[in-house]
Amino acid sequence: MRTLVKVLATIIIITVSCKKELNYNVLTGKWRLAEVTLSTGGFPTTKAVDKSNNNYVHFKSSGDFESNSLTEYTRYEVKDDLIILYKRDNSSFTYAYRLNNQMLYLSPRTVMCIEGCSDSYKKVAD
């Protein structure tokens, strides 16, 4: 009986100690859309995204990019505080990015966001 208890205790300790924590300080990984910040000429307003919204971005260490909302983009490159997403034809779209407080913030660097806009993502996998 004592042996069984020791074996079970060992299995529990190994299982609990092997849980991997997400690394929020690196861009690579899968991120789920959590908030959207918009402005229609006044101060920007931030709204939480409904939990049923499963939009995500996935930055792979190989430079490959995957998303269910930005489906035309297949690769990415990081330059300073910018992420450049590339389509198959090498055309691109640039976002400013920052990692803060377990969140990834992406803000388009185009005329479409004169007043300011951004998407905030929560990391779900490395």
Image (tube, rainbow, N blue to C red):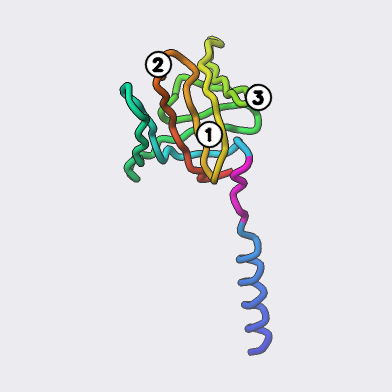
The label shown at residue 41 is: none
From the image, tell me which residue sits under label 2. 112
From the image, tell me which residue sits under label 1. 58
Residue 102 is one of the magenta-drawn residues: no
Q: Amino acid at mark 1?
A: His
Name the residue at 56% across, 41% down: 100
Mark 3, Cα crowd under 10 Å, few <14 / some 14-19 / many 20+, is few
Mark 2, Cα crowd under 10 Å, few <14 / some 14-19 / many 20+, is few
What residue span does the magenta drawing correspond to?
A: 20-25
Q: Residue 6 location, x and y as percent?
A: 67, 81
From the image, tell me which residue sits under label 3. 80
Disc 1 from disc 2: Cα separation: 23 Å
Q: Residue 44 location, x and y as percent?
A: 37, 30
**Mark closer to the observer (1, 2):** 2
Q: Amino acid at mark 2?
A: Met
Q: Amino acid at mark 3?
A: Asp
Name the residue at 50% across, 18% down: 109
Image position of 2 with respect to 7: above or below:
below
| Quadrant housing the N terminus | bottom right
